Image (tube, rainbow, N blue to C red):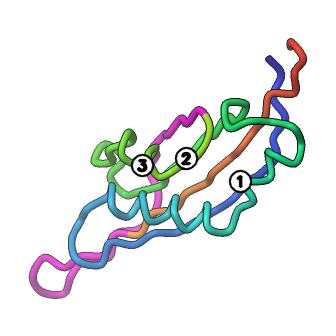
Amino acid sequence: MARVRCITEMGMGVDVHGRDATKAAKRAVSDAIRHSSLGFFRFVGKTPHDMLVDVTIGVPNPEAVDTAAVAKELPYGTVTVTAVKGGLEIPAETGSDAIIIANAAVLVSLDDGKTA
């Protein structure tokens, strides 16, 4: 199946009361899809099953991200989530209230109906 990239969205998410990379990642994905046109597929004669959604999450500690939980933030399509080193961790001056900032890149492709 040949893929045609249709949407690229970026988002940022923050966990301000701890070091929960999954929470920050989910917020970053939610931020990205709030700005997107994911519902457009109906206008081009496609269904949610035709959508292929590739998400890359940048966080300071990629192995701490529950990628299955992040994938559930996406309302449509076949979702693949990859966590990579990135984002930002701001240590707390006192106590354990560090800040984790995650970045999300959401790439949406559609099956163009042709074989590659």
Query: Mark 2 = which residue?
Result: 56
- Secondary structure of residue under mark 3: helix
| Left-right relation of 34 to 8 | left
Quadrant the C terminus occupies: top right
Tell me the mark number nearer the camera, choosing from 2 and 3: 3
User: Which three-letter amino acid code belongs to the residue tagged 1?
Assistant: Leu
Q: Is residue 92 magenta?
A: yes
- Based on the displayed image, in which of its 4 quarters is residue 76 positioned? top right
Find residue 104 and report its horizontal and vertical position in percent: 55, 57
Residue closest to the far left:
95
Is 74 above or below relative to 26?
above
Query: Who's the residue at 33% across and 61% down the image?
Result: 23
**Which of the two discs, 3 and 1, labels the residue nearer the N terminus?**
1
Q: Which mark is residue 50?
A: none
Q: Nearer the viewer, residue 53 or 18?
A: 53
Q: Rate crowding at label 1 as few (under 14), some (14 to 19) or many (20 or more) other CA atoms within 10 Å.
A: some
Question: Magenta span covers which residues?
Answer: 78-100
Query: Who's the residue at 68% across and 38% down the image?
Result: 48
User: Which three-letter amino acid code belongs to the residue tagged 2?
Assistant: Thr
Is 86 above or below relative to 82?
below
Q: Nearer the viewer, residue 47 or 23?
A: 47
- Number of residue marks: 3
User: Which three-letter amino acid code belongs to the residue tagged 3?
Assistant: Val
Residue closest to the far top:
115
